[in-house]
Image (cartoon, coloured by chain):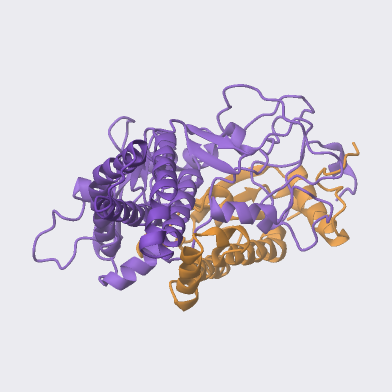
Amino acid sequence: MNNCEYQQIEPLSLPTPRPAAVEEEEEKARRKWEVFPGKNRFYCDGRFILAQQSGVLPLTLGLILVTTVLFFVFDCPFLVKHLTVFIPAIGGVLFVFAVISLLQTSFTDPGILPRATPDEAAYIEKQIDNSGSSTYRHPPRTKEVVINQQVVKLKYCFTCKMFRPPRTSHCSLCDNCVERFDHHCPWVGNCVGKRNYRFFYTFIVSLSFLTAFIFGCVATHLALNTQTINVVFDFSSCTAVELVICFLSVWSILGLSGFHTYLVASNLTTNEDIKGSWSGKSEAEDTGNPYSYNNILTNCCSVLCGPMPPSLIDRRGFVPVEQSSQTVSMEMVLPMPAAKEIKVVVGPTPSQLPPSRALQVPSSPLPATPLSLTGRPQFSCLF
Amino acid sequence: MERAGTHGEMTLTGEKRDWTHSLQDMRQQAAIAAKVFIQRDYTNGTVCQFQTKFPSELETRIDKQQFEETVRTLNNLYAEAEKLGGSSYLEGCLACLTAYTIFLCMETHYEKVLKKIAKFIQEQNDKIYAPRGLLLTDPIERGLRVVEVTIFEDRSLGR
């Protein structure tokens, strides 16, 4: 084998990435989030992901902030004086929990499945044609698998060019297949799926506690206040605003929390519940849901406290250049459908290594790398 | 063309360079003959498991037992990553109590096992698959959907 030939060929990677290699950089190296085919928006160079339509996320945040601020400003002084100092403390903790889990729900990758590579798609098509189950394109292609003695149909996704895993659904708003798809929530501006369901659940539970708590405190305040004579006009109108907001929202949020508690306990998703995937079964079967552990505690633990799966879309990795291009051109040939506009990205300086999947780089990364190889898992595991 | 960060000339450890050297030579001198995709096995639910059925395209290249052993070990590793047990519950509960901010500073159990898997695949490629003109791709690069096995043409390896 020649010793020096590999230096002549630039760029070097194949469509199949090497297990322990770092993806090479061109001067205009692009990160994968820039060429992501789904309808998502990315912030902070791919660290945060949001749906294209943020829905009413600003409204949600605004309502929570306004109500809590009004509560702290107008009700807490009175209640601290008349009742206990723990009231603002409890309110503060609930508020922090609610806001943090809301932001995490909104900015976390819900479990998006990356689309099939062209090779994969061709392989699957070949298999379908060989098996003769579908000779033309348009009828939905399905594949049946047996999961825990139940027959489950897997549908073929024409957008993502793959058979969807069980419990995966394609969100038309985000144009992505999402694992364990629950629903697309406009209030948080993102899909709720496998990776951010626990954040979503924490959010609605803490929000329902917060709303109920504020409602209770405000009602107490008003009740106690009528006993005293002085009622300042703008003082009580703010309290009334809080009362109205809380009263209107507490029922729906409490109801939603209750509904999701039921879903968690039976290991169902909203999508499955609405479609009645498992409820149409006959009485003779103990349970229609093949994913349930048939034990409420195990179901809850597995959904809420299970291991946190990683993000599969590798937003901050660099797009590899296909070997077939073989030219040192300014343009990059992308394995995935190209992004809408060509963006010139400032490539890393020579002292920096392009960040790659940190798991695949062997033990000694460059110490001077600010785009740290350890940075990726920390962000990816959260988002 | 000398450029820092270019693959093969990076200032990583020498042994890494030698490893990629031999794989690179193989890749540049060998064309890709075919690719085989090992699909997921859903009989146990949504846990990440791959089918151990031996694909016919690999019959001439590798031993059936060897291949099945690789896939079985991979499956065991993924099962370990997704295992529901005391330690994972503890991690989950602790994360919940800290409003999940603990994920910012801590590597999750799953990520640790993914590193193990990456290392395992690298070893397998080194020892078993590269000498036979095959290359395994880490499933995480394919969204945990498939294990991609690239089959290179034989000519450059002198077999």
Closer-to-camera residue (B76/A316): A316
Q: Residue at x 29, y 46 (%)?
A: A246
**Residue placed most toward the observer, B156 or A91:** A91
Chain displayed in purple: A
How many numbered dots are placed on residues in this image?
0
Up-down relation of residue A141 to residue A332 (above or below)? below
Instruction: Tell whether A247 sits left or right of B114.
Output: left
From the top left corner, tell me how far across and down residue B155 is, in percent.
73, 48
In this picture, residue A371 sits left or right of residue A32: right
x 26%, y 49%: residue: A250
Residue at far front of view: A229
Q: Is residue B46 visible?
A: no
Q: Position of residue B124 (x, y in %)?
A: 66, 65
**What color is chain B drawn in?**
orange
Frontmost residue, A172 versus B95: B95
Above-or-below relation of A45 to A104: above
